């Protein structure tokens, strides 16, 4: 649908498939990629300066949520969309850099984590090409997951990112976002030294908390979620915001059942994460 706005890719013709480069960036100056595994630089004009010289110490993972890679790259790299990311990881494992790590890319939107609200200023954003929930939500190919892992490992070393600050977009914007979603293999990342994860507690019968509940147990749950970093104000009321945060938590840490209901498995998994967190969350 965006074919008319795309220029021919400038790259090695031996490549399996040319990358479509949006016309509007054809004049933009290329930069030296921050990561050695970047195969292509497609500079996006959609970035600014990080607030007050903030250096990135968080990684936010997204999916593109669009039917094809051409449309996704056009959206991230064309002026006027006000959207971008530092990196795009294609399904075949190729890694494209669109914004330099030192700059503030526009990927997180209205977000918060561990008391911080300008997530774009403190993070590096990685868009993983996947059509997303609205377009069939395919599995993430192994080559692509391996590329995400390799990319993150480099960023972790360069930027000293703590494991519990490698997050989903849905973690930092639980009421608006669901990417990269419950099919994203966080366990595989953990097995490769990327991110924070514990084996989810088995799902069993027992007490549950859900929308409409209130009381000290709900307050304790909210306190634990906020302590881990979620942007939730503890009130003792299991409201829509609480259900959204529980849903986001499940997508990341207990993907076997994503329903926004705090069952015993969800609560036990959260407690195990809190107990095993390598260092305290940054305020
Ligand atoms: Zn996203």
Image: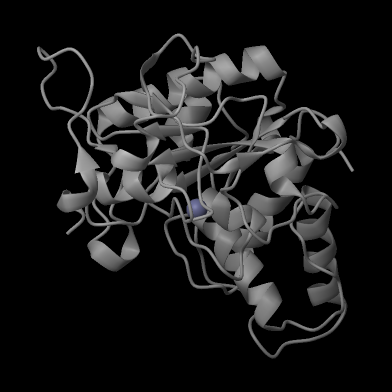
What is the x, y in percent for residue 236? 85, 80
Does residue 272 appear in the picture of this structure?
A: no
The front one of 104 and 139 is: 104
Q: Residue at x 67, y 24 (%)?
A: 102
Q: Residue at x 71, y 83 (%)?
A: 239
Residue farthest to the top? 36
In the picture, measured across the screen, residue 70 lies left or right of residue 236, that is left
What is the x, y in percent for residue 65? 35, 56
The chosen color scheme is: one colour
Q: Residue at x 22, y 17 (%)?
A: 11
The front one of 211 and 91 is: 91
Does residue 9 appear in the picture of this structure?
A: yes
Residue 206 vs 268, above or below: the answer is: below
Residue 24 vs 15, above or below: the answer is: below
Residue 205 vs 170, above or below: the answer is: below
In the picture, measured across the screen, residue 120 lies left or right of residue 148, that is right
What is the x, y in percent for residue 249? 60, 57
The front one of 162 and 95 is: 95
What is the x, y in percent for residue 83? 51, 51
Residue 271 vs 233, above or below: the answer is: above
Name the quarter where the C terminus is drawn: top right
């Amino acid at each position: 649908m965006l074919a008319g706005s795309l220029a021919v890719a400038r790259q090695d013709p031996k490549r399996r498939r040319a990358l479509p480069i949006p016309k509007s960036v054809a004049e933009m100056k290329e930069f030296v990629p921050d990561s050695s595994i970047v195969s292509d630089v497609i500079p996006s004009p959609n970035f600014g300066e990080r607030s007050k010289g903030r250096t990135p110490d968080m990684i936010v993972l997204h999916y593109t949520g669009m039917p094809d890679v051409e449309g996704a790259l056009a959206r991230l790299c064309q002026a006027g969309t006000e959207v971008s990311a530092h990196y795009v990881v294609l399904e075949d494992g190729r890694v494209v850099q669109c914004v330099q790590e030192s700059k503030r890319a526009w990927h997180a939107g209205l977000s918060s984590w561990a008391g911080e609200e300008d997530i774009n200023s403190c993070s590096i954003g990685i868009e993983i090409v996947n059509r997303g929930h609205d377009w069939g939500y395919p599995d993430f190919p192994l080559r692509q997951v391996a590329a995400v892992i390799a990319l993150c490992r480099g960023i972790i070393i360069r930027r000293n990112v703590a494991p519990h600050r490698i997050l989903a977009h849905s973690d930092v914007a639980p009421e608006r976002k669901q990417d990269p979603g419950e099919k994203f293999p966080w366990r595989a990342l953990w097995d490769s030294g990327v991110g924070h994860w514990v084996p989810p507690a088995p799902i069993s019968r027992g007490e549950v908390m859900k929308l409409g509940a209130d009381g000290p147990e709900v307050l304790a749950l909210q306190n634990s979620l906020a302590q881990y970093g979620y942007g939730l104000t503890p009130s003792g009321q299991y409201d829509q915001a609480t259900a959204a945060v529980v849903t986001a938590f499940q997508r990341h840490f207990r993907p076997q059942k994503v329903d926004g209901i705090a069952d015993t498995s969800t609560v036990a998994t959260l407690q195990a994460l809190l107990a095993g967190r390598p260092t305290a969350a940054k305020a």
